[in-house]
């Protein structure tokens, strides 16, 4: 299981994880969309050889077109690869043993370095990604312009090539009706809100990814410090919202949480959407000490283990959505 899921991090009662991703390309080499298979495979070998030389090595190599669809979806559910890489016929991923580092190869860009850590550790995640970047650059010649910075396939990534983000759990802000105001404010200061699996994915279980929108004109330090500061402010707003709920509507809040607990402990059929919603309630209940003997890592494990691909891997066969809903409910009952 990925380290960001099982290990404890700062403020992880609200911040599930912090992630930094760096996009890089090799000079005088067509972007992945224009590479033939032979050139893409050769580039994968060069990048793996460069990565294995020093920090955080060795990595396990996953060649995307040689993987069963189910295995690709599991890596996606664990946030180790992107939806775009899942669909790639020329892509690969280098993943560390603790699954806190992944290097995606031939996705939209030649290289996507990702560091993902538990809790609010955006600055540390950047330090890790930066170390790996330095190791790769010792061997690989990056496409870089003195004026524009790192050159990328999509213009929105030009400059630092960095996306920094924090995945945060904001149920109380949603309950008191302030979530829209918070998210609107975030977008006004140059940040963006993404779903649980990144751009274009839906919001589930009151989980939101806050990330930078601008990569050009700001330094990497400024980007990570901005994400860290804004996330810390949102965490405080969520704490304030929780206090409001406890002070003004404690009985109703406890009732909502315990009803969700009862459903999760006893239901025989459970959809993904319903599970995420109910898990959000009991995560809040655990944070407020309403429900004893629960841990963040257990709830994170349940969240990942009840995703569609992970369920099918656990039983060793493909299942219909209806069959998955039955197994999901069983997994939740057993783990709780």
Image (cartoon, rainbow, N blue to C red):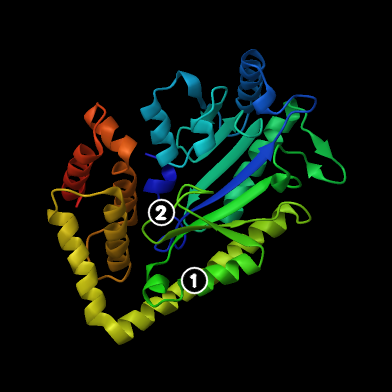
Precedes in sequence: disc 2 or disc 1: 2
User: In this picture, is 224 found above or below 63?
Assistant: below
Between 200 and 47, the residue placed more toward the observer is: 200
* Residue ID at (76%, 32%): 142
Is residue 63 visible in this depiction of the protein?
no
In the rendered image, residue 178, in percent from the top left (x then y), is placed at: 46, 76
Residue sitting farthest toward the right: 146
SS at mark 1 in the image: helix
**What mark, if any, has residue 328 been given in the picture?**
none
Is residue 301 visible in this depiction of the protein?
yes
User: In this picture, is 237 found above or below 221?
Assistant: below
In the rendered image, residue 335, in percent from the top left (x then y), is placed at: 20, 48
- In the rendered view, does 171 fall on the left or right side of 282? right
On the image, numbered disc 2 is attached to which residue? 8
Between 40 and 100, the residue placed more toward the observer is: 40
SS at mark 2 in the image: loop
On the image, numbered disc 1 is attached to which residue? 180
As measured in the structure, the alpha-carbon distance from the residue carrying label 2 to the one carrying label 1 is 29 Å
Q: Quadrant of residue 252?
A: bottom left
Q: Are marks 2 and 1 in contact (CB under 8 Å)?
A: no
* Residue ID at (67%, 21%): 35
- Looking at the rendered image, the disc whose residue lies closer to the viewer, 2 or 1, is 1
* Residue ID at (44%, 53%): 202
* Residue ID at (46%, 71%): 179
Question: Which quarter of the rendered picture does the N terminus lie within?
Answer: top left
In the rendered image, residue 194, in percent from the top left (x then y), is placed at: 52, 55
- In the rendered view, does 84 fall on the left or right side of 246? right
In the rendered image, residue 217, in percent from the top left (x then y), is placed at: 79, 55
Residue sitting farthest toward the bottom: 248
Q: Quadrant of residue 193?
A: bottom right
């Amino acid at each position: 299981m990925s380290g960001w899921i099982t290990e404890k991090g700062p403020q992880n009662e609200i911040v599930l994880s912090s992630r930094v991703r760096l996009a890089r390309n090799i000079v005088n080499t067509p972007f992945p969309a224009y590479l033939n298979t032979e050139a893409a495979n050769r580039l994968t070998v060069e990048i793996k050889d460069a990565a294995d030389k020093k920090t955080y090595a060795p990595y396990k190599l996953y060649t995307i077109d040689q993987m069963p669809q189910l295995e690709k979806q599991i890596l996606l559910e664990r946030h180790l690869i992107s939806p775009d890489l899942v669909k790639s016929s020329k892509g690969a991923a280098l993943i560390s043993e603790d699954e806190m580092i992944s290097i995606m190869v031939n996705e939209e860009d030649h290289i996507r370095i990702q560091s993902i850590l538990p809790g609010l550790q955006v600055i540390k995640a950047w330090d890790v990604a930066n170390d790996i970047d330095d190791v790769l650059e010792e061997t690989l010649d990056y496409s870089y312009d003195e004026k524009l910075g790192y050159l990328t396939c999509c213009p929105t990534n030009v400059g630092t090539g960095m996306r920094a983000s924090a995945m945060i759990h904001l149920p109380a802000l949603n309950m008191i009706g302030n979530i829209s105001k918070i998210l609107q404010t975030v977008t006004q200061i140059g940040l963006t809100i993404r779903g649980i699996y990144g751009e274009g994915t839906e919001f589930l279980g009151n989980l939101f990814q806050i990330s930078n929108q601008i990569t050009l004109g700001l330094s990497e330090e400024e980007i990570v410090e901005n994400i860290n500061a804004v996330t810390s402010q949102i965490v405080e707003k969520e704490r304030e919202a929780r206090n409001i709920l406890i002070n003004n509507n404690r009985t109703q809040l406890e009732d909502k949480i315990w009803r969700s607990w009862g459903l999760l402990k006893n239901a025989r059929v459970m959809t993904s959407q319903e599970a995420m919603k109910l898990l959000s309630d009991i995560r809040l209940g655990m944070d407020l000490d309403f429900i004893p003997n629960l841990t963040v890592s257990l709830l994170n494990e349940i969240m990942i283990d009840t995703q569609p691909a992970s369920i099918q891997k656990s039983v060793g066969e493909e299942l219909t959505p209806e069959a998955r809903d039955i197994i999901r409910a069983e997994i939740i009952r057993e783990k709780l």
